[in-house]
């Protein structure tokens, strides 16, 4: 009797499907607007009007006095080059791999995903460096560009609802309604924490919308 244990001529059973389980979402890079840099040194202007904390009234007939004026300041960053290389031999392309796809096309798709994830990481965590001969310059990410309201949280600590509201309040106080954040991007663990906040649990709906 012949059983599969002894049969060495059996063909393998391999599905032409490749399951990609890479967490490759890049929401920040996808949503940010783009501009064109005309030099490796990239700058933009930033200005801030300090809200008054007191007021001095002028007397009748008083001569006008003038306070010092401030100009917008320049914020500087550097352009950076991100690459993701790959190479597939002609012999490999001539084979019949699982997945039913040209190995070159498959590796190109993986490289593009990897590049995009690298871009997302650089946008958030990049550190400014002008580079040296043979070493590329690197750009500053958001963490290293934001200074006034920059905050960090140690691994393993818990985000409270009060702290989250304080961050929103500070954002509004520093930037006004036009610059207060209306979108929060966090890892899934913090998203679950924020989902558990209860301050916004009570919803009010205009009665006319119910008619």
Image (cartoon, grey):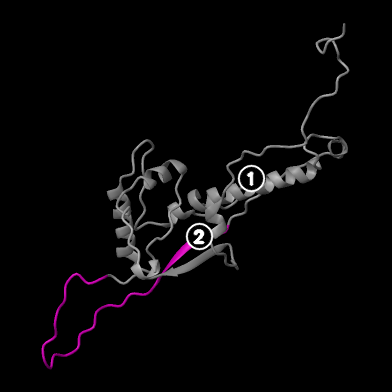
Residue drawn at 63 percent across, 48 percent down: 115
Identified at 79% across, 44% down, the residue is: 104
What quarter of the picture does the N terminus occupy? Answer: top right
Q: Main secondary structure of the magenta part?
A: loop
Cα separation between marks 2 and 1: 24 Å
Q: Is residue 71 magenta?
A: yes
Furthest-front residue in this view: 211
What is the number of callouts on the image? 2
Nearest to the observer: residue 130 or residue 179: 179
Q: Residues within 10 Å of mark 1 (few under 14, many from 20)?
A: some
Q: Nearer the viewer, mark 2 or mark 1?
A: 1
Seen at 28% across and 70% down, the residue is: 50
Residue visible at 60% across and 67% down? 36
192 or 116, nearer to the observer: 192
Residue 49, by quadrant, is bottom left
Disc 1 target residue: 114
Q: Which residue is mark 2?
A: 77
Residue 71 picture quarter:
bottom left
What numbered label is drawn on residue 127? Answer: none
Residue lying farthest to the left in this orientation: 59
Image side of residue 18 versus residue 93, left or right: left
Based on the picture, tell me whether residue 2 belongs to the magenta stretch.
no
Q: Is residue 130 visible?
A: no
Q: Give the SS element for disc 2.
A: strand
Helix, strand or loop at mark 1: helix
Write down the region rendered in magenta: 51-79
Mark 2 Cα within 10 Å, few/some/many (few <14, many 20+)?
many
Position of 70 with respect to 25 (left or right) is: left
Q: Whole-percent x and y of residue 138?
A: 55, 52
């Amino acid at each position: 009797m012949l059983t599969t244990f002894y049969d060495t001529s059996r063909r393998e059973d391999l599905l032409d499907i490749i399951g990609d389980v890479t967490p490759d979402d890049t929401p920040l890079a996808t949503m940010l607007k783009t501009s064109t840099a005309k030099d490796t040194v990239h700058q933009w202007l930033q200005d801030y009007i300090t809200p008054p904390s007191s007021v001095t009234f002028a007397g009748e007939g008083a001569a006008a006095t003038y306070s010092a004026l401030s100009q917008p300041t320049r914020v500087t960053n550097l352009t950076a080059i991100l690459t993701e290389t790959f190479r597939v031999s002609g012999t490999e392309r001539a084979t019949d791999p699982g997945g039913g796809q040209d190995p070159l096309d498959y590796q190109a798709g993986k490289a593009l995903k990897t590049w995009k994830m690298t871009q997302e990481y650089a946008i958030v965590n990049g550190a400014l460096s002008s580079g040296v001969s043979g070493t590329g310059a690197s750009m500053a990410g958001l963490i290293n560009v934001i200074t006034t309201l920059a905050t960090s949280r140690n691994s393993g600590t818990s985000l409270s609802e009060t702290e989250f509201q304080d961050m929103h309040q500070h954002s509004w106080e520093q930037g006004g309604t036009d610059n207060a954040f209306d979108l929060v991007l966090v890892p899934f663990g913090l998203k679950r924490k924020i989902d558990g906040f209860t301050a916004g649990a009570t919803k009010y709906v205009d009665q006319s919308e119910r008619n």
